[in-house]
Amino acid sequence: MIEISPKAMFHVHTYRCRHASGTDREYIERAIELGADEIWFTDHAPYPGDKIGTRMLFTDRPEYISTMKALRKEYAKDIVLKLGMEMEYLPSYDGYIRETRASKDFDLLILGQHYYERPDGSFYFAKREEENADERFGLSEAMIMGIKSGCFDVVAHPDRIFRNCPVWTEDMAEISKKIIDAVRGTDIYLEKNYASSIKRNHYWNEFWELVPDNVRTVKGLDAHSVDSLKILDFEYEPVH
Ligand SMILES: [Zn+2]
Ligand SMILES: [Zn+2]
């Protein structure tokens, strides 16, 4: 079971995923400047074969681990550096995900279900169009499989699966309850994702109102640039 400090910079990416900017040191030094006591690097995990776009390359994984371990030592007197990765749950990579979970190199894994795997083995990633609103079914099923795999400590932006839904509906509430039920009674955190809260329809208060007090939640940045690091001490204002 992990504990995340209320003064943590949680959910931080690196340039290795090929859609984030800044150096590792710039993130760490900015986090210290802002008064954070922990920084949790959780870059997008690579998958063997590199078939999924804009992710760390599989060959870069050892360097990610060794560099972060060295930086953890170097900055130890100023900040606690935790190392993890953000991964989709994809059934054909179940063995790889379990191996990663068992590895001592990572302090946590977060489940970020941006894609899901179709029965034919292809990967689905919707564009921002309302006709893709049905992605909520495939994404939520994959997310629940991921939660039940026991491999993840945090579910990133669970409400982002509704980003292509224009208004809140009863079936979204039903899907939300299934996700919440899957984490109930576990130590898994549901993440209130700051990056989602500033994008239209990516963050839903209606989801968070269904989450009972005995389910753990954490505020996460999903930072892809040094300038998006901030202390999360405010309430979120979703955009619809
Ligand atoms: Zn990203
Ligand atoms: Zn992320």
Image: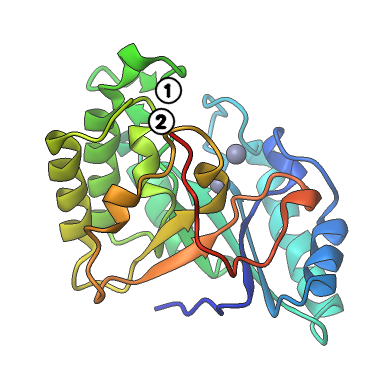
**Residue at left offset 77%, top offset 77%:** 35
Above or below: residue 88 compared with residue 147:
above
Q: Which colour scheme appears in the figure?
A: rainbow
Quadrant housing residue 64: bottom right
Give 153 or 199, whichever is nearer the viewer.
199
Above or below: residue 165 compared with residue 157:
above
* Left/right of residue 138 with respect to residue 114 in the rendered view: left
Indicate the amino acid at tag 1: Phe
Residue tagged by mark 1?
125
**Residue at left offset 69%, top offset 44%:** 224
* Left/right of residue 170 with respect to residue 113 in the rendered view: left
Find residue 226 and report its horizontal and vertical position in percent: 79, 51
- In primary-sequence order, the first of circles 2 and 1 is 2
Give 158 or 115, whichever is nearer the viewer.
158
Using a 10 Å C-alpha cutoff, classify the residue at mark 1 as few (fewer than 14 neighbours), some (14 to 19) or many (20 or more): few
Disc 2 secondary structure class:
loop
Query: Residue 236 got which mark?
Result: none
Q: State whether residue 146 appears in this view.
A: no
